[in-house]
Amino acid sequence: DGGITQSPKYLFRKEGQNVTLSCEQNLNHDAMYWYRQDPGQGLRLIYYSQIVNDFQKGDIAEGYSVSREKKESFPLTVTSAQKNPTAFYLCATGQGGETQYFGPGTRLLVL
Amino acid sequence: GENVEQHPSTLSVQEGDSAVIKCTYSDSASNYFPWYKQELGKRPQLIIDIRSNVGEKKDQRIAVTLNKTAKHFSLHITETQPEDSAVYFCAASWDSSYKLIFGSGTRLLVRP
């Protein structure tokens, strides 16, 4: 877990604004994931990437976009199309079919 | 697609008692079952996992059992302590899958 960093810890978004959440890992894992967690709720998969330059939509991809230009990095952009973005965003890494390890998370709030 | 159901959603036990959380999965191809513990405001952390070639695994006060025939697996915590209070998530996966399918979570409260 110590090999996954997310920034910022807290992020504030204004109406109509796109914001980008950072996720970096030094575990040399092939796969990276983004989850959304609403208060008191479970984990919902937004996007995942099995390999550089490739990614797939999860269960709630609408209003989000990602890129995977480097193995170590998997940034998530919350676009203005996501009307209810307030949540705890968790990045995870893993090696296909194996354990996923989570980063410390970013808490996104709407102003 | 694969679905994982987790019960109960909340569980309150007296310190020192045992706690059991049960998950049921739908895809018989599933062969990897991790359990995560999430403390308030923190990230989920892996506490124990089991593969389908093993029926039970223990690590100190926690254990996981797997019944492949019934397609369910359970987390057992013995001699519970207040610091065991957290939300616990089960999950399931299978070879060649890059996705973990998570249960909805169980909020465990250990009363001192």
Image (cartoon, rainbow, N blue to C red):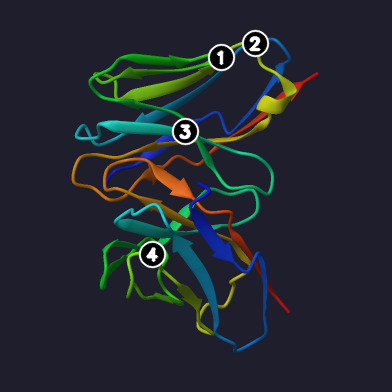
Tell me the element at label 1: loop
Q: Mark 1 — residue?
A: B61
- x, y (%) of residue A29? 33, 53
Displayed quadrant of residue A52: bottom left
Disc 3 versus disc 4: nearer the observer: 4
> How far is disc 3 from disc 4 in space, using C-alphas?
33 Å
Disc 4 versus disc 2: nearer the observer: 4
Q: Amino acid at mark 1?
A: Arg
Q: Mark 2 — residue?
A: B79
Displayed quadrant of residue A99: top left
Q: Mark 4 — residue?
A: A72
Q: Earlier in the sequence, mark 2 or mark 3?
A: 3
Q: Which mark is residue B6?
A: 3
Left or right: residue A61 versus residue A9 is left
Find out whether the residues at labels 3 and 4 contact each other: C-beta distance under 8 Å.
no
How would you rate the neighbour count of disc 1 (Cα within 10 Å): few for under 14, some for 14-19, many for 20 or more?
few
> How far is disc 4 from disc 2 in space, using C-alphas?
41 Å
Q: Quadrant of the C terminus of chain B?
A: top right
> How far is disc 1 from disc 2 in space, using C-alphas?
7 Å
Disc 4 versus disc 1: nearer the observer: 4
User: With respect to residue A26, does B38 lie above or below?
Assistant: above
User: With respect to residue A69, does B100 lie above or below?
Assistant: above
Q: Amino acid at mark 2?
A: Glu
> How far is disc 2 from disc 3 in space, using C-alphas?
22 Å
- x, y (%) of residue A82? 52, 77
Query: Is there one chain holding both mark 2 and mark 3?
Result: yes
